[in-house]
Each structure stands twice: as C-alpha cells, then as structure tokens.
Amino acid sequence: MKLKYNDKNKADYAQFRSKLHIRLLGIAVIALIITSVLYTLGWRGRGGEWMVSVFRKVFRMDYRNAVNIYQLVFRNYKYIIWTIAIVVTFFVLLRVVFNWFTRYFDMINQGIDTLLSNDSEIYLPSEMAAIERKLNAVKQELRQRTLEAQLAEQRKNDLVMYLAHDIRTPLTSVIGYLNLLAEAPDMPADQKAKYVDITLDKAYRLEKMINEFFEITRYNLQQISLSKENIDLYYMLVQLIDELSPTLCENGNTAALKSDENLTIYGDPDKLARVFNNVLKNAMAYSYPNTEIHISAEEKGGSVVISFMNKGKTIPQEKLSSIFEKFYRLDEARTSNTGGAGLGLAIAKEIITLHGGTITANSKSETIVFIITLPVKN
C-alpha cells in the first residue's frame, strides 16, 4: 500500500526542513568565507612572502632558492592546490553535516527503544515534534492493545475456570447415577426410569457446556460473512418466540410482540435470527419469574428499531458498559442454569455492526432494554 505524502505531512516536517536548509546554507556560507579568507590572505596578500620566509627558516635556504621553489611548486600549480584545498574543506564540512544529521537518527533510535519499553514518554528536539507525536501515539496504542489483550486473556481464563467448574457438577451426577444403576441391576423400574431421566438431563447440560467450548473456538478462528436478502422481520420474531416458548414457560415468563406485520429488513436471515435469539435468551436468563418480555419493532427514518425489554435486577453501569465484550458474563451468570460462554452478545454486536447497525443496552429501575437499529435497505 502506497502512502500519500499530503499537506499534513508537509506541515508536520516544515520546522525540521527549515532547520536543515538553514544549516546547509550556513555551512555553504562558512565554506565560502574560509576559502575567500585563505585566498585573500594567503595568495593575494603577503602569503607568498610568508611561505618564502618559512622555506628559509625551516630548510635553511637562501632567499633566491626559496623564491624559486615557491614559483615552481605553488605559483605554477595554484589551481590544482586551490582545488585540493576546496575539496578538503568541502569534505571536512560535509563530515560535520553528517555528524549533525546522524544525531537525529540516534535520537529516533533512542525513541524507538523507549517505544519498545515501558518507560516514560518519548521526547525529541522541537524540530522533530511530528515524529515525537507519532511515536508517542504508537506507544499509547501499543499500551492499549497490550491491556486489551491481557483483559481478554484474563476473561478467557476465568471463563475456562467457570466452565470447568460447571462441567464437573453434571459430570459427577452422571457418574454417580450410572454407578447406582450398575450396582443395582434389580432396581425397580420406576426408580430406574427416574435415575435415567436425571442422568439424561445432566448429560444434556454437559453437552451444552461442551458446545460452548466449540463456540469459543469457532468465534476466534472464523470471520463472520453475510448473505443478505429481504427478510420478513415480523414473521422471524413470531417464529423466534414460538421456538423459545417452552423455555419461557419454565420460569413463568411470556413474550409479547408489537410490530407491523408488513415490516421487512435487508440482511442475513440466519445471522439476524441468531442475534435475536441471543438477545431474547439473555432477557429470559435475567428476567424476574412470572414477568413478560416486551419485544417491539418499528421503522424510524430509514432504519428499523427492534427493542427487547424485560423486568429484572438492574445492571450496574460499570457492568453494562462491558456486556458486549467477548467472554464477559455477569456474576449471576456463573450458575449452572444461566451460565453461558459470554459470547452471545459479543457475536450479536459483531453481526449487527456488519449489517451497518448498532446494538445498545441500558438498565434502570429494574428494567433492562436492548435496542437494535438496522438499516431498512442495503
């Protein structure tokens, strides 16, 4: 992917470029001044006499021989000598530039070292403020991702611990009742049937917990894809209520639907059915006994709003804000009857987001409401 160098990048590095240009210009001026001074003093001034004097003192020459050497060596090759002098001056000043410029790379390298550690914020010279901001932004992002990964790992570990505890209970019951049946082959038929029913119920519970482990694996390894079509929303919600009616009756709950019978939406029917199923099951799990769950759906300004409202213990705000996170479960959900994998609402949120909608929850005065908003058209 190619990165575009836009006006924002130019503005970010304006100060750095200005300082670089000023320094390079300054070095060029210094080189010119040094060369001019040497030429004026050493060549056009009394430089020749000074060199003759040096020859006489150092090499013990007479005046005529010193002048002849000066003429033969320096005067006749003056352009070559000055070219060498200019080149030497250039490379000396160029080395100064490189030393100055590589200092910035050293600072950036130190900033990267700080980025990879848990030390304090990164500080660079003022002309590198743009790089400093970006490195600190990356550092903050890495901190946030590390924290989120640690929280996700902790929740997953907690989930495994809860599921292991929940699995142990039905498994112990299954083993216990099967031992009773094995040790008493002449047990009365009615008592044997009772034990078989209990064992079968515990085995179903155990199967449900194991399926939740597989659900975790599927959720982590696959991306959710959508196959959209026009959906009769009213019929889907009626069918959902009918399917879950036996479970509702177990706790004395009922579900009432208020919706236009002609209401339709455009989406993936299987995925949306899963969303509504997860939300309704959550409402069932946290409803007071013998209360009614109110489901409503209506079109508002190009969107369809579906709400699930139930009476139950008020969910604290700090828990409500995390209810759509993976592996999150309320404390009350750790029991064998209502404990889930903590993935239902997280998956629901991802599916709704892929549809271009939103899902929110609020709770007050012992009333819990989940609101799903979906676009009517693609």
Image (spheres, grey):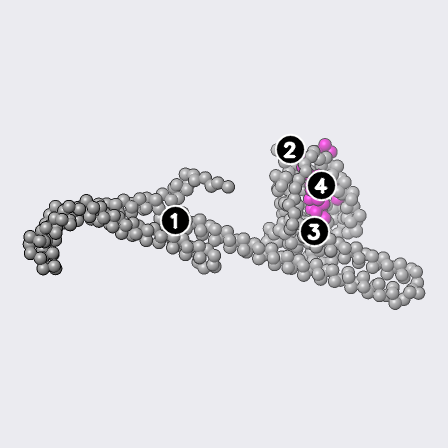
Mark 2–mark 1 CB contact (< 8 Å): no
Residue receiving disc 2:
377
Within the magenta stretch, is there residue 275?
Answer: yes
Identify the amino acid type marked 1: Ala
Looking at the picture, does residue 357 appear above or below residue 366? above
Res. 73 visible in picture: yes
Identify the amino acid type marked 2: Lys
Upstream in sequence: badge 2 or badge 1: 1
Residue receiving disc 1:
129
CA gap between label 3 and label 4 equals 16 Å
In the image, taking residue 8 as reference, residue 304 lies left or right, namely right
Upstream in sequence: badge 1 or badge 3: 1
CA gap between label 4 and label 1 equals 51 Å
Residue in the picture at 86% in, 65% down = 180
Upstream in sequence: badge 4 or badge 1: 1
Mark 2 lies on a secondary structure that is loop
Upstream in sequence: badge 3 or badge 4: 3
Upstream in sequence: badge 3 or badge 2: 3
In the image, taking residue 328 as reference, residue 175 lies left or right, namely right
Residue receiving disc 3:
215
CA gap between label 4 and label 2 equals 17 Å
Classify the position of the C terminus by image quarter.
top right
Residue 354 pos. (x, y %): 62, 41
Q: Nearer the viewer, residue 197 or 39?
A: 39
CA gap between label 1 and label 3 equals 47 Å
Q: Residue 270, labelled with which disc?
A: 4
CA gap between label 2 and label 1 equals 46 Å
Q: Nearer the viewer, residue 167 or 1?
A: 1
Residue 53 pos. (x, y %): 9, 55
**Residue range (magenta):** 255-282
Mark 1 lies on a secondary structure that is helix
